[in-house]
Image (cartoon, grey):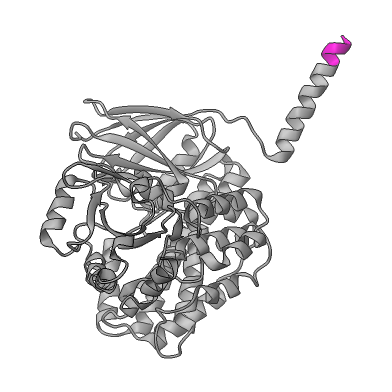
Amino acid sequence: MKKIFFKRMIFLIVCLCCKLSGVQAQVDITIGGHFSKELPKGTKFNLIVLDEYALPNWFAFSTVYKSEISEDGSFQLNFKPKSSKLFVSFKLEGSKHEYNYLNKEDNNYTLYLMEAGDSLRMDISDDNVIFSGKGEDRMNCQQAIYSNQIFPRNAILPLLRQKERKNSGDYVKSLIGLIDKNLQTKLAILDLYKNDLTDSVSQIIKYNTIGGAYLTLCSQFWLNKGKVGFDFPVFRQEYLNWLSQTPEDGNDLAAYAPLYIKYLFEREQSRAAYTKYPDKIAQDFEFSDILQTITTMPVNKQRDALLTASAINLAERKAGVQDTAASIYNMLKDPIIKDLFERWQSKTGNNVPAYAFSLPDTSGHMHRLKDFKGKMILIDLWFNGCFGCKYMNKEMRKIIDHFKSKNAKNIVFISLSVDKTRKGWINGLKTKEYSQPEQLKLSTYGTSWFDNPFYKHYNFKGAPQLLLIDKKGNVISSAPPDPRFDGGKALIELMEKNL
C-alpha cells in the first residue's frame, strides 16, 4: 500500500510540475472533410501550422501537412501539435504546385485558432466552410467572423469616388468608420459564442479579430501613398488622430494572436513613415526609429512578440537589424519567444553556416554549396513576372562589371529562380530581363515559397532578394544592401570588405 501511495504522490507531483511549467502531453488533431465542387485530379488539401508566436508568411516557422483529395472530394489527415493552442491556415495545392484558398473569402490572414485534441470535419463550398465535431463552436465562430467582409462590394465604389475627387479627409473618415463598424459586428458574432468558448480562447480570438481589422486600416494608410487623391498632410493628421484614440492593451493573451502582433508592427512601421517628415511619407525610415518606440513600452509578452516581429519583418529591408540582434535578444523575457528569435538568428544571422543547398541548372546538373568553397557567392532570387526583380537585374549588371576585371575568379554570381514550375523559370530566362550572362542559372522549381527548404531556411517572404555567402560557406548577410537604392555602392563595399 505504501508503494502505491508513493507512486501516486510522485505521479501527482509530476503532473503538477508539468502544469506549472506549461508542459502538456499533446493529443493529436484530426481533420477531414469534403468539397462540394469538383476539383482537378491531383489536388491536395494543405494545412499550414504556425509555430507559437509566429506571424503569417513566416515560412521558416510553419509546418505544412498535406492530404490527397479523393475523386469524391474527401480528405483526411492528423498530426501531433507542438503546443496546446495553435493557429492554422488552409490552402489547395494543384498538381503543378499552384496554390489557392478554400473559398473566395479567404486570404493570407485567414487564420484559425485550433486546440490539441480537435477532431473536425469540414464541409466546403465555393463561399462557405462548415465545421462539425470536437472544436466546431470555436471554428464556426471564426468562420463567421471571416465571412463578414470589411469591404463589401456596395461600400467600395463610394469610397473610391471620394478618393478620386481628392476628398482625402472624407475618404479617411469613411474608411475608419467602415472598418470600426465591421469590427463591432465581428465582435458581436464572437459574443454570441461566449458560452461555448473558454475565456482564454475567446480573448485570443478577440485580439486576432481586432488585429485583422486594424491591420487593414494600417495597410490602407501605407498603400495609399502616392495614389490618386492622396493628400499627405490630411492622411498624416487623420492617422495620428486615430493612433491617439486607439487604446493600448497590455494583456499577455494578445501576444498569442498573430494578426494582433502583425497589426502592432504595421502600426509602428506606419507611424515611423508618417512622422519622420512633415511634408512627405518616409520610405527611408530606420529600424532604430521603430526600435526606440517599442523599447519604451511596458515589458510584457506583447513587447517581446513585437520586438521579434519587427526584427524578422524588417531584416530583409532595413540596415542595422542584424547589428542590433544581440541586444534585442537580451531584452526578451518570454522563453518561447526568445527561442523563436534564437532559431531565426541561427539561420539568418551574420557569420552562421549557410543553408547547404543542392539545386539544378537548366541542364539538370546539380550544384551544391560545397562546390563553391573558397569563393564568395552572391545569390539573386527572382521569379517570372516580378517587376522589382527586373530592376534588381539591371543593378546586378553594375555589380558584375565592377568585379569583372578584378577578383572575378573569387566570386560566383548565381541567378536563382523561385518559380513554381520549370516552364515559368525557362520562360523568364528567355526574356533576359531577370539574369545576366555571367550568372549561374539555378532554380527551386517544383515547390512553393512556403514549403521550399531553401526559402524556409532564411524565412524569405518575397522577391527580389539577395543573399551573400563568404568563402567558408558562412552567411555574410541574408539581407545585404539593395543596389537599387544607391547604384550598388554599399553592396560593393560589403563584398570588397569580405573578399
Up the image or down, 40 lies above or below 351; here it is above
Q: Residue at x 61, y 46 (%)?
A: 200
Q: Position of residue 153 (x, y in %)?
A: 26, 62
Left/right of residue 73 with respect to residue 60 in the rendered view: left
Q: Is residue 4 magenta?
A: yes
- The answer to whether any part of residue 47 appears in the image is yes
Q: Nearer the viewer, residue 278 or 487?
A: 487
In this view, the residue farthest toward the top is 1
Q: Quadrant of the C terminus?
A: bottom left
Q: Residue at x 29, y 85 (%)?
A: 166
Q: Nearer the viewer, residue 119 or 46?
A: 46
Q: Quadrant of the N terminus?
A: top right
Q: Position of residue 65 (x, y in %)?
A: 39, 35
Q: Give the magenta range.
A: 1-5
Main SS, magenta region, reads helix
Q: Is residue 401 magenta?
A: no
Q: Position of residue 244 (x, y in %)?
A: 56, 77
Left/right of residue 411 with respect to residue 199 in the rendered view: left
Q: Residue at x 53, y 30 (%)?
A: 117
